[in-house]
Amino acid sequence: MPKLAPKTVADSAIEGHVYKVFPNDLNAHGTAFGGMIMAKCDRLSLVVAERHSSHVCVTASVDSIHFMAPAKENDTLIFKVSINRAWNSSMEIGVKVVAENSYTRGKKHILSAYFTFVALNEENKSAPVPQLITETSQQERRFQQASIRRKARLKTIEELNACE
C-alpha cells in the first residue's frame, strides 16, 4: 500500500462558516435549539474529515459537547472546525462555535465539541488516512490532547462492550 502524504490542519479547516439564527431555529426557551447547532457541527466536521482523508467518512463518536452560553434570535453563529489528530483510519475533529451580535459585534463562545470520524473505502471498510502536520503551538497542543481523549473514548467503548 502506498504511503499517504501527510496534510496540514489548514488543508481541511473551516475557519468562519456563518449561520444566522432565525425564529424557526429557537426552542421553547427562546434560544437557539441545541440539536440544530449539533447537527451543523456534525456536518461541518464531516467536511473536514473528508477533506483530510479524501474518503467517505462516518461519525464514530461525539464527546465533550459543552454548551457554554445560549445563542439568541438574530445572533450570527460562527463555526471554526479543524482536525486535531489522525490515527490509522480515524480522526478527531474539534469544533468551536461563537455567537456574534450582528448589531454590536459582541461575541461569546457558545459551544465546544469533539467528533471522531472513520474513513471508509469502497467496500465500506476502514481506510487509512494521512497523518497530520501541526504548524503552530496551538495545533500541537490540540494534537497532544487528542491522544488523551482517544484513550478515554477507547476505555469507554471497552466498558460498554463488557456490559453486554
Image (spheres, grey):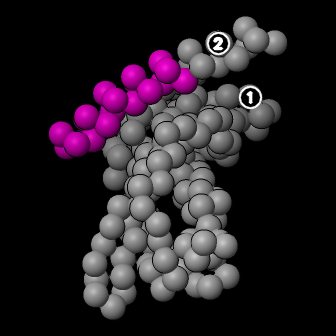
Q: Relative to 23, say whether 47 is above or below.
A: above
Q: Quadrant of residue 34?
A: bottom right
Which of marks 2 and 1 precedes in the sequence?
Answer: 1
Which residue has dot 2 on it?
Answer: 158
- Residue beneath the point at 70% across and 35% down: 121
As measured in the structure, the alpha-carbon distance from the residue carrying label 1 to the one carrying label 2 is: 21 Å
In front here: 120 or 20? 20
Magenta part of the chain = 134-153
Residue at image position (77%, 34%) is: 124
Which residue was labeled with disc 1?
A: 125
Counting other residues with Cα less than 10 Å from the Cα at mark 1, is it few (<14), some (14-19), or many (20 or more)?
A: few
Q: Is residue 123 magenta?
A: no
Asked whether, in this view, residue 95 is left or right of residue 46, the answer is left
* x and y, in percent, of residue 99 in the image: 40, 71
Quarter of the image holding residue 43?
A: bottom right
Name the kind of residue labelled 1 in the image.
Lys
